[in-house]
Amino acid sequence: MNIPVKDKYRLQDKIDLILKVNYNSSFFAAIFGLVCFFFLDIKGIITYTFIGYAILNLLNTLLYQKHHKLTLTYNLTSILSMIGAIIITIYSGGIESPFIFVLAIIVFAGYVTTKVFGQLYLIINLAILTLLFLYDTGDFRISENTVPLESRNWFAYLSIVFAVYLLGGVFGKNLLRAHHRLYKSRNEIQERIEEKETLLKEVHHRVKNNLQTVSSLLSLQSRAIDDSKISSIIKSSQNRVVSMAMVHEMLYKRDDYLSKIELEPYVKELCDYLVRSVKGSNRNVKVNLDIADYKLSIDTVIPLGLIINETITNALKYGITEGNDGEVHISVEKLDENRYKMYLGDNGVGYSEEINPKTSNSLGLKLIYNLARQLRGSISRDYSKKGTHYCIEFEEVIEEFNSVDS
């Protein structure tokens, strides 16, 4: 499996940080041990621990180049650091030893690596501090402070310098560098997102304009034809184009640029347009909508809009006759995570049960059933009510919208 680019950068930052900490801590531990031996007259286990830690940690770091297991390298370093810090702390004053602050750096390194390791080493080191406190307050003694009295101030100073340098000069410096790199990358990503959002918005705008141009051409063509049947066919095609153009117009007007359409405003705008288009200004058709705040993908809304266009257009043309008050009802309810049920109905005259896509040459009727299948759904009619009533179960789809075979 390929590692995402951003994860590769994060992993590389951790690798660089851990390796630099290991090399620096090994180098300064060796220097610290030599200073203790030659200048502070600290002989025995403290000096040996510094030198031993420096050698073992350096070997551990070099072995990473062979096995490339960062977790193994980090945990071995942490274990070596804890053991070395505990030994030096016990032999340099116990709970009062200035070297005890190195235990805090181990915890800090854990949190820099992962939250899990940070919590693990926090618990371990808190337990170690408690044991050191109990050790110092108890009667049992492994050893007294082996740092000569005249060298204790220098040992305290060098211990604090060692801890501060690792914490600030190594961890702090590299974390700041990683933060700046992350901040720069974040700004670059944000700029690219804004460019893509602007481009996407422009695409929807151009698609909407192109569809509106097609709609205008169809409207002009229908007016130039004397044959009312052909003119009606062209007008129906125009309405289908408009139903798709409305989707892109709503996406263009959105501020968040998500490919999700608010269903209720879209259906309302589409129904109002169809009523005006078919019935004109002197209309007596009431549209009742019962749609919750659903947001569906463009791949779902476009075929859904075409279904609504066909059913409402047929109801307005053939079901709801002139002089009668018409009523159209559309409701949508959610069945589960991505499945919905839509009811479409009118109080018109309806049509015979014998008429179906197999027995009829109606393009609109075939579209309704084919689009329902494209939405991975099913469609049925309710014959118990006056007029024409459809019940469509469909699924939200997010994929390329293919053309519908008639």
Image (tube, grey):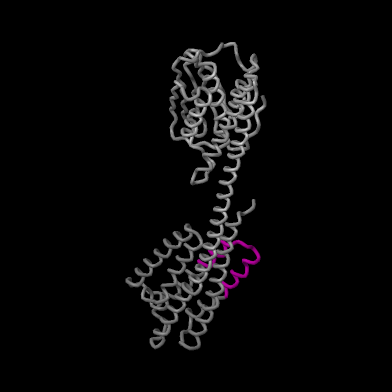
Dominant SS in magenta: helix
Given residues 142 and 191, the one toward you in this image is 191
Give the image location of residue 76, x and y in percent. 54, 65
Q: Picture coordinates of residue 296 (x, y %)?
A: 52, 36
Residue at the image position 56 percent from the left and 46 percent from the top: 201
Give me the residue at 50% from left, 18% from top.
Answer: 389
The correct choice, above or below, for 113 with respect to 143 in the image is above
Residues drawn in magenta: 55-78
| Residue 194 showing in the rendered view | yes
Left or right, residue 94 beside residue 315: left
- In the picture, the quarter occupied by the C terminus is top right
Residue 195 position in % (x across, y down) = 57, 53
Residue in the foreground of this view, choosing between 399 and 352? 352
- Is 20 magenta? The answer is no
Q: Quadrant of residue 103?
A: bottom left
Name the spot of residue 345 as percent of width and height, x first.
Answer: 49, 20
The number of callouts visible is: 0
Vertical position of residue 325 compared to residue 20: above or below: above
| Whether residue 146 can be seen here | no
Check the image and report above or below for 336 versus 24.
above
Q: Considering depth in this image, is 51 or 376 the residue closer to the camera?
A: 376
> Is 62 included in the stretch rendered in magenta?
yes
